[in-house]
Image (cartoon, grey):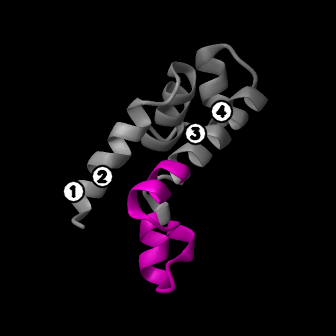
Amino acid sequence: MERAELYAKLDESVNALPEQCRIIFQMTKEDGLTAKQTAEILNISVRTVESQIYKAIKTLEKEITSYLGYSPRNIKNPKLRKEMLSLFL
């Protein structure tokens, strides 16, 4: 499997997240905002941001595990495992 294929699947999975979850995930993971900054911009609690990030990561991990046929957490090569997990963590 090529990286481009995996990135495409990840993008598809991010776009399939519920709207609030997707927005929060993108603001924190893609735009680099902190949970506090995200909460202030969206006028929600930091706890809500943290909860939505957790839900997004779990959903994305489940989607990628289903797509790959194995969990990225089970990859034995530490460098490759770190790279795979960094895609969505």
Earlier residue among tags 2 and 4: 2
Mark 1 Cα within 10 Å, few/some/many (few <14, many 20+)?
A: few
Q: Are marks 1 and 2 in contact (CB under 8 Å)?
A: yes
- In whole angstroms, how far apart are the C-alphas of marks 4 and 1? 26 Å
- Check residue 70 for magenta coloring: yes
Please identify the quarter of the rendering in which residue 47 is found. top right
Identity of the residue drawn at 42% across and 57% down: 87
Please identify the quarter of the rendering in which residue 56 is found. top right
Q: Are marks 2 and 4 in contact (CB under 8 Å)?
A: no
Q: Report the disc number at residue 7.
A: 2
- In whole angstroms, how far apart are the C-alphas of marks 2 and 4? 21 Å
Q: Are marks 3 and 4 in contact (CB under 8 Å)?
A: yes
Q: Are marks 4 and 1 in contact (CB under 8 Å)?
A: no
Position in image of residue 19 (x %, y %):
50, 20
Element marked by disc 2 = helix
* Residue picked out by circle 4: 52
Q: Which residues are magenta?
A: 62-84
Q: Are marks 1 and 3 in contact (CB under 8 Å)?
A: no
Element marked by disc 4 = helix
Among all residues in the image, which is located at the extreme top?
Answer: 43
Earlier residue among tags 4 and 1: 1
Residue type (three-letter) at the residue carrying disc 1: Ala
Mark 2 Cα within 10 Å, few/some/many (few <14, many 20+)?
A: few
* Residue picked out by circle 1: 4
